[in-house]
Structure formats: C-alpha cells, structure tokens
Amino acid sequence: MQRVVVDAAGRVVDPDVPLLHADDLGVLHGDGLFETMLVWDGRVCGTARHLRRLAWSAEPAGLPAVDVDHVARLVEIAAREWTSSAEGALRVVYTAGREGTAAPTLYVSISEVPERVEAARRDGVRAVSLPSAYRSGLAAQAPWLLAGVKSLSYASNVAALRHVQALGLDDAVFLSVDGTVLEGPRSSVVAVIGGALVTPRRDDGILPGTTQEAVFELAQQRGIASREESLHVNDLYDADEVWLLSSITLAARVRELDGRALNQTSVVGVAELARESAAS
C-alpha cells in the first residue's frame, strides 16, 4: 500500500518517519485546517476549489494567510509521486504550528481511498438523522464556532460516524435545533425535489462543499435547476432522490433514512454529474 508525504519545503519524506512535533497546536488543540482531494486517473480533482476554501478559512481560523501557489506546488509534487493504480486521498494539513511559535505547519500526504468508498458509490448508504447544537443564524452570531470552516477540530464528526456504525448504519445527516437539515459528518446533502437540485442554505452554518458546488455549476450548464433553501427531514423523506456528496466518495445515494426506505427513482443523474465535474 503506497503512501506519500511532502513537507512544507517540497521534500518527499519517508511516511514512516514522524513529521509533527509533540507540541504542534494542530495535535494539542485541533488548531488548524485541512482539505482532502481525490487523486483519480492520475490527476488531483478540484484543486483550485479546495485551495480557495483553504485560503478563505485561514482568516476566521486565526491562521496566517495561505500561500496558495506554494501549496499547489506541494500538491503537484505529491501527485507525481503517487504511482499506485488505486485512487488516492490527498490531504493538505495546515496548523498553527508549534506551541509558542508563530510558524505554521504545512504538509501534504496521499494514501489509498478506503474500501467503504466504492461500496457507497455502488450500493448507496443507510443513514440516520442526528441532532446538533446549531440553530439557524448561529454561524453569523458566533464566528468563533468556525461553522463553514474545514477545521482539524473534527472529533464530533468522527464520533457521529462511530455512533452510526455502532447502529449498523453507514452515515448520518445532522439537523439543527430548529429541525433544518445541515450536512453529513463528511458530506453535503443534496436532494432532488421537483426535478431541481436542492441543498441547505450555507448561512445555516454548513461547510461550503466543493463537490456540491461543482455539481451545481455543471447542472446549471445542462439546464438543470439548482438552488439553496431550508430543508427539513420530511423533505428528504419525500424527495425524488437524496445524495451525500463529498470530495472522495463523490456521490452516495441515501437509500434509507431513519429506517425509512427512500425513493430510488432516477430523475437527475447526480452520480454522473459528480463524476463528470470531478474529471473536468
């Protein structure tokens, strides 16, 4: 199984040799950002979108500005080193650096995509809705919560995934205290309603999904309506299609939510749009 690690200086380093210091604030406090991109057919998908989000996230996270061109070069170096025939998950990690210093930590790694990804693409997923502490408008009132930022403080998302796996399920959909649909622990929620692609409003504090954004742009070019609006779980129960979109899985259809079998007719080719937008 191949693994690639590139440090901030552009050096390809031994993936079995430790890279982080014990006092790195990314480890101690989750004080940092990350982006994950799919390496598919020899290319990195969506680099510009991901690095744009990374650069935007630095200010609300209180981190130094990101040198996007430099990070892009590190991504290119890592991609050249990836010789495996398997799909890869490329991660850019950017932390506040070591405790007591002002120098951020930056590195890029690639590892093989987990086996669950192909199963989710092929078979879809069984999911459950989970409550969260977010309410509509909270992101604007409490910017320190870093809603909409892909932060290394990811423990609650991982805990949610462990919880649903313990239930014998595959994934989750977070709901706000108002009952509106937010996002998945690692995905954007997209429903097909009346022939249109619908995703929750970004001002509800969700992470702006790069795959969702790319799919909506391509859909609009094809004359397929798309919009953001508040959704409730009942809207998902009644939708023509419900999908979880993410950079690595691309598109996983939700075939069951909260024990209810969802509609499995195909109105819009969401999976095809996701694959095509990733390949463009």
Image (spheres, helix red, strand yellow):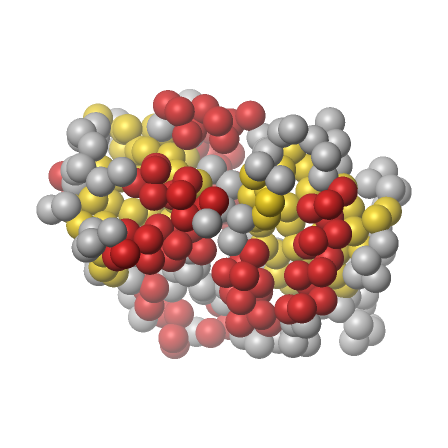
Give coordinates of residue 262: x percent, y percent: 21, 30
Give coordinates of residue 162: x percent, y percent: 51, 34
The quarter in which the N terminus is drawn is top right
Name the one closer to the observer, 80 or 233.
80
Q: Residue at x 80, y 68 (%)?
A: 99
Q: Residue at x 51, y 41 (%)?
A: 248
- Image-based side of 280 in relation to 88, left or right: left
- Image-based side of 99 in relation to 223, left or right: right
Q: Residue at x 18, y 37 (%)?
A: 267
Give coordinates of residue 274: x percent, y percent: 38, 43
Name the one closer to the observer, 252 or 195.
195
Q: Residue at x 27, y 32 (%)?
A: 258
Count of marks overlaid on the render? 0
In the rendered image, which quarter is residue 226 located in?
bottom left
Give coordinates of residue 146: x percent, y percent: 50, 67
In the rendered image, which quarter is residue 180 located in?
bottom left
- Asked if one can make out residue 6 in the rendered structure from this viewpoint, the answer is yes
Name the one closer to the observer, 135 or 112.
112
When the figure is inspected, residue 116 is found, relative to residue 268, above or below; the finding is above
- Asked if one can make out residue 174 in the rendered structure from this viewpoint, the answer is no
In the rendered image, which quarter is residue 275 located in?
top left
- Image-based side of 192 in relation to 163, left or right: left
